[in-house]
């Protein structure tokens, strides 16, 4: 596959939802854009989810990705945190799917291993490797860097992921 493919990576979160857009042609990766959506924490949950949906929708419309990659949820703060994050993750999965964009999910450890080489990398290591892989990337914070790492992971695994999706 040598055609240009635009990928949006999404690091779901209700307080901070990172996003990163890259392009891949064969094994060549290019940075497009990244950032973080931050719905106000003082709003009711439904309004925060609505703002997250609107923000992701605007990104889908602006960058027109061909594929979306979303990180699977890893929570170690308790059931209430897991429930809230799961709702934000649902919005992150649904928004591209609603626009006909194929959505792929990746475990946190696979993202880290794909980008850094070890599944137990910390945020500083991820940011450093994303900067090496995409020197023009201008991310301000871990959430946008994580989203770019998710997109990079998908770029590395997309051929196998597409085969798996086709056979399901």
Image (cartoon, rainbow, N blue to C red):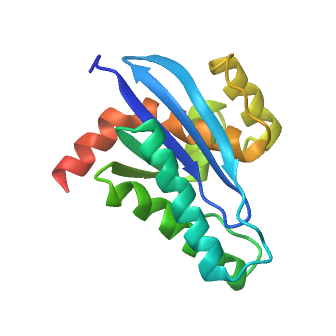
Where residue 29 appears, x then y in whole percent?
A: 50, 20
Locate the C terminus and report the quarter of the image it occupies.
bottom left
- Please determine whether, in this image, residue 47 is positioned above or below residue 35: below
Whether residue 50 sits left or right of residue 156 in the image: it is: right
Residue shown at 63%/37% (left/top)?
A: 34
Q: Which quadrant holds residue 79? A: bottom right
- Please determine whether, in this image, residue 87 is positioned above or below residue 56: below
Residue shown at 60%/45% (left/top)?
A: 19
Where residue 132 appears, x then y in whole percent?
A: 70, 18
Where residue 165 appears, x then y in whole percent?
A: 25, 50
Whether residue 33 sits left or right of residue 144 in the image: it is: left
Locate the N terminus and report the quarter of the image it occupies.
top left
Q: Which quadrant holds residue 16? A: bottom right
For the image, the number of numbered tags is 0
- Please determine whether, in this image, residue 141 is positioned above or below residue 58: above
Residue shown at 69%/38% (left/top)?
A: 145
Give whichever of 11, 46 is nearer the camera. Answer: 46
Where residue 120 appears, x then y in whole percent?
A: 71, 45
- Please determine whether, in this image, residue 116 is positioned above or below residue 26: below
- Asked whether residue 33 appears in the rendered view, the answer is yes
Whether residue 121 sits left or right of residue 29 in the image: it is: right
Give whichever of 154, 16 is nearer the camera. Answer: 16
Whether residue 22 sits left or right of residue 164 in the image: it is: right
């Amino acid at each position: 596959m040598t055609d240009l493919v635009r990928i949006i990576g999404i690091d779901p979160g209700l307080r901070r939802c990172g996003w990163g857009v890259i392009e891949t042609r064969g094994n060549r990766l290019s940075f497009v854009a990244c950032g973080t959506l931050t719905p106000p924490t003082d709003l009711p949950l439904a309004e925060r989810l609505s703002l997250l949906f609107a923000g992701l929708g605007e990104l889908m419309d602006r960058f027109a990705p061909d594929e979306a990659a979303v990180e699977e949820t890893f929570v170690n703060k308790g059931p209430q945190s897991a429930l809230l994050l799961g709702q934000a993750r649902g919005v992150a999965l649904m928004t591209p799917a609603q626009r006909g964009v194929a959505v792929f999910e990746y475990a946190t450890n696979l993202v880290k291993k794909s980008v850094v080489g070890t599944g137990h990398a910390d945020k500083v290591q991820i940011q450093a490797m994303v900067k090496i892989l995409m020197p023009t990337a201008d991310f301000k914070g871990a959430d946008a860097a994580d989203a770019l790492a998710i997109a990079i992971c998908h770029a590395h695994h997309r051929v196998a992921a597409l085969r798996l999706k086709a056979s399901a």
